Amino acid sequence: MKSIVVLSISLLLLAGCGSPVEKAGSNHLTLWYNQPAKDWNEALPVGNGRLGAMVFGDATHEKIQINEESIWAGCPVNNNNPRSLQHLPEIQKALFESRFREAWQLANDNMLGTPPRIRSYQPLGDLLIDYGWKSEPTDYRRSLDLKTGIAATEFTVDGKKYRQEVYASVPDIILIINIKALDGGKIDATISMTREKDAMITTDSDGTIHLNGQIIDGEDAGSGPAGEHMKFAGEARITHNGQSTSPPAPLPRSQAPGRGESAPAGFTVNMASSISLRLSAATDYSVNQLNFDRSIDPAAVCAKTLDQAKNQTDKSLMKR
């Protein structure tokens, strides 16, 4: 009986120690913070299993890092070491005789793959949103609803409230970014995409940003052959109800694939009460072939994916 009383009191005390989420009036499946992410580890993730994003939640200079699951450096290679079987009995004998250091050296010399390492996964790139606020944002809050998968950033500028939402649609295989003025405010923002290397970023007059690239691997005997390997693409379509959409000025010219960092390219939106972006990404990797398939056009796949979702409203995408 004494144990039951102690347990009951403990549960009551825990129930009264409400979490920060509960005190803020949110449901218990929401993570929330009072400041933007300082680095990638603090950003909030959204995704649909193939396409994902890390949302930093900066109300002035937003950064959304985009991932597509198949973007890897390198190429298929048979790294089975032909010396492994030959030296296996020798290594086993050394282990059984407790000559562990010798066994380790034999295994290190003869059992590692050829090459011993693989090249790395790579992000698609960054989507940047530079807001043109005249004053510093206040009443800041960013959150991730674990039930809906929506990463939201909320803040106030000059007495007007704004909300940015980022989420992914599973059946449509796209990312959606919605920015809204909630009570009559206006949004000025420069929206662009960039990638560290191996990509060219261009824009169309209709508010579309294209990112096209191919991974150029350098010489590295420990990680496989050099060469022109995986092709990839991303496409972001911007719609809004503002007065104008124009290329942001000045933006440096994008650089050709394999020639260093790709400069950002995008648009400036003025006096909008809402802005919506839909983004898709693809590569020329074939699951069936477990290799590149040069008949696949990643840019065409992106365009088709976005076209198929164009009749879906933001509200319907949020439920899918």
Image: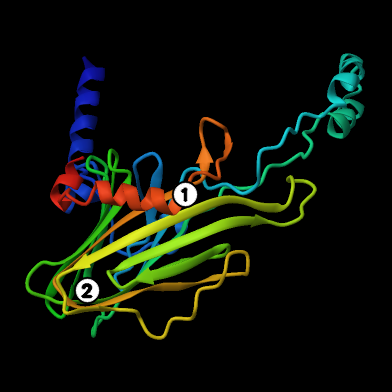
Q: Which residue is mark 1?
A: 297
Residue at (19% x, 68% y) in the render: 240
Q: Decide which of 80, 13 is in the foreground and name it.
A: 80
In this rendering, would 295 be left or right of 82? left
Residue under the image location 17 percent in, 48 percent down: 312
> x and y percent of residue 20 in the render?
24, 51
Judge the density around disc 1: few (<14), some (14-19), many (≥20) Cα neighbours within 10 Å.
some
Q: Quadrant of residue 35?
A: bottom left
Dot 2: what SS? strand
Q: Earlier in the sequence, mark 1 or mark 2?
A: 2
Residue lying at 52% horizontally and 44% vertically, measured from the top left: 295
Q: Is residue 41 visible?
A: no
216 sits to left or right of 92:
left
Local SS, label 1: loop
Q: Is residue 241 visible?
A: yes
Horizontally, is 314 left or right of 54 in the view?
Answer: left
Residue at (50, 52) in percent of width and height? 232
Tell me the mark number nearer the camera, choosing from 1 and 2.
1
Q: Position of residue 138 (x, y in %)?
A: 22, 73
Look at the picture and state if 29 lies above or below 102: below
Q: Residue furthest left?
A: 183
Amino acid of disc 1: Asp
Q: Report the disc number at residue 138.
A: 2
What x and y, as percent, mark residue 220? 77, 52
From the viewer's perspective, tell me whether residue 42 is left or right of residue 181. Answer: right
Which residue is outermost to the front?
295
Q: Quadrant of the N terminus?
A: top left
